[in-house]
Amino acid sequence: MHDTRLIFVEGLPGLGKTTTASWLATRLRAEHLPVRLYLESQPGHPINVGGDLHPAGDVTGETYFQQYRPASFIQESLERWQAFVDDATQADTISVLDSYPFQNSVRILLQMDAALDDMRAYAAQVEALVMPLRPVLIYLSHRDVAHSVQHFSEIGAQRGAAWMDYVARLIAHCPYGAARHLEGTGGVLAFMGDYKQLTDALLRESRLPRIVLKDCAGEWNRCYRQIEAFLDLAQVASH
């Protein structure tokens, strides 16, 4: 098994992060490894800034964006990360985090219309804080921005009008969306394109050991075998 105490499962919405994180936790437990699984919007999440106000799941964030600004978000987030690392270093477990280090943090800073340099500095600070846990990143991706936009449109069609309406409100009611008049499906797709460009840039700057898996939909067995090889789970299974 790869010598890690923290596994990030990340990627754009609709790519299977939660499914993959849940599968991975089950796979690790099958090897009798102690695991803590943290899904994107579970109650009491230790990293989600603002607790129940955190804009994820079905919370659109209107109250959240009234109470938080980029500086206050970053301050609380870094405090939460430090507490998380302090706790994790004392526990003999592997933490699996769904939708981190980007979607539940950098995505929200982008919604706040934070400055690019501030988001880059924040991402670097988070990486520095978690390094004692020897983190690794599993990143689910598309071929390019155009494909990501097309895929998100397909996901919206699959999940229905209520879900797309929620996502549209999530974007329209945040500072970034309001400043750019991003509304409806077109606004969502414009935001997703901007967010992918940002996360692609942060991924290039990241020092995290990682595996990037493209186009896993319909080919999950292939992707899961690649994850097992990346984490050296085959070696654990052989003992």
Image (cartoon, helix red, strand yellow):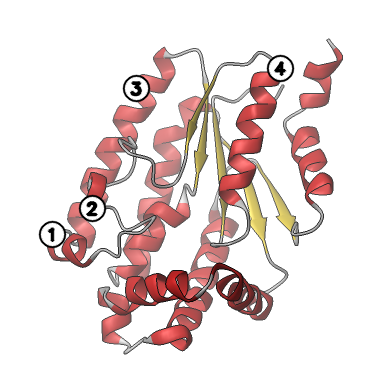
Q: Position of residue 180 (x, y in %)?
A: 32, 88
Report whether 230 appears left or right of 162.
right
Q: Earlier in the sequence, mark 4 or mark 1?
A: 4
Q: Which residue type does callout 3 highlight?
A: Asp
Q: Tell me, for residue 67, which label it has, or none.
A: 1
Residue 113 appears in which quarter of the rendering? Answer: bottom left
What residue is shown with label 3?
86
Q: Which residue type does callout 1 highlight?
A: Gln
Q: Position of residue 48 (x, y in %)?
A: 32, 45
Confirm whether residue 9 shows in the render.
yes
Label 1 crowd bin: few (<14), some (14–19), many (20+), radius 10 Å: few
What residue is shown with label 4?
31
Q: Earlier in the sequence, mark 3 or mark 1?
A: 1
Q: Which residue type does callout 2 highlight?
A: Leu
Q: Position of residue 159 (x, y in %)?
A: 55, 67
Confirm whether residue 137 shows in the render.
no
Q: Earlier in the sequence, mark 3 or mark 2?
A: 2
Give the residue furthest to the top: 239
Separation of marks 4 and 1 at Cα, in angstroms: 43 Å
Separation of marks 3 and 2 at Cα, in angstroms: 24 Å
Q: Tell me, for residue 53, which label it has, or none.
A: 2
Q: Earlier in the sequence, mark 4 or mark 2?
A: 4
Q: Position of residue 64 (x, y in %)?
A: 20, 60
Q: Nearer the viewer, mark 3 or mark 2?
A: 2
Q: Contact, CB < 8 Å: mark 4 with mark 1?
A: no
Say which residue appears at 47% left-offset and 26% top-offset: 132
Q: Contact, CB < 8 Å: mark 2 with mark 1?
A: yes
Q: Earlier in the sequence, mark 2 or mark 1?
A: 2
Say which residue appears at 75% left-offset and 62% top-offset: 215
